[in-house]
């Protein structure tokens, strides 16, 4: 990756870890490029799980529709005042 941006480097083993050696003048640019490269390669978080489905939600819908129909029937048959705000 460093060669692609024009920074000459070499990998070396110091006895414990592998290290990247670059010229002293290129050190700040190298750190910046390696930090950016690491941030770009970080895996994206998995998408959130889908919301749970409610298999019996239709029961509430049916009850709501039946309530609306019942109120309409009660008003139209005179069991309730036509203007509730009167």
Image: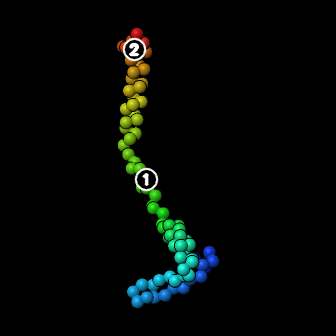
Mark 1 element type: loop
Count neighbours of disc 1 (C-alpha within 10 A) and say few if under 14, some if 14 to 19, many if 20 or more. Answer: few
Picture quadrant of residue 17:
bottom left
Q: Give the position of the C terminus as an image quadrant.
A: top left
Picture quadrant of residue 65:
top left
Would you place residue 75 above or below residue 20 in this image?
above
Picture quadrant of residue 33:
bottom right
Q: CA distance from mark 1 to mark 2?
A: 43 Å
Residue drawn at point x = 39 percent, y = 50 percent:
52
Front-most of residues 41 and 22:
22
| Label annotation for residue 84 | 2
Would you place residue 30 above or below residue 62 in this image?
below
Front-most of residues 56 and 41:
41
Mark 2 element type: loop
Farthest residue, direction top: 86
| Label annotation for residue 50 | 1
CB of mark 1 within 8 Å of CB of mark 2? Answer: no
Residue drawn at point x = 56 percent, y = 72 percent:
29
Is 69 on the left or on the right of 11, as rendered? left
Is 8 on the left or on the right of 47, as rendered? right
Q: Residue 55's x, y, as percent? A: 38, 46
Q: Residue 5's x, y, as percent? A: 62, 75
Q: Is residue 80 visible?
A: yes
Count neighbours of disc 2 (C-alpha within 10 A) and say few if under 14, some if 14 to 19, many if 20 or more. Answer: few
Residue drawn at point x = 56 percent, y = 81 percent:
23
């Amino acid at each position: 990756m460093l060669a692609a941006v024009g920074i000459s480097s070499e990998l070396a083993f110091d006895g414990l870890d592998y290290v990247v050696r670059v010229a002293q003048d290129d050190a700040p640019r190298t750190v910046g490029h390696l930090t950016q490269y690491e941030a770009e390669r970080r895996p994206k978080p998995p998408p959130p799980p889908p919301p749970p489905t409610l298999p019996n939600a239709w029961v509430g819908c049916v009850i709501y529709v039946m309530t609306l129909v019942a109120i309409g029937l009660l008003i139209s048959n005179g069991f309730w005042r036509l203007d509730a705000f009167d």
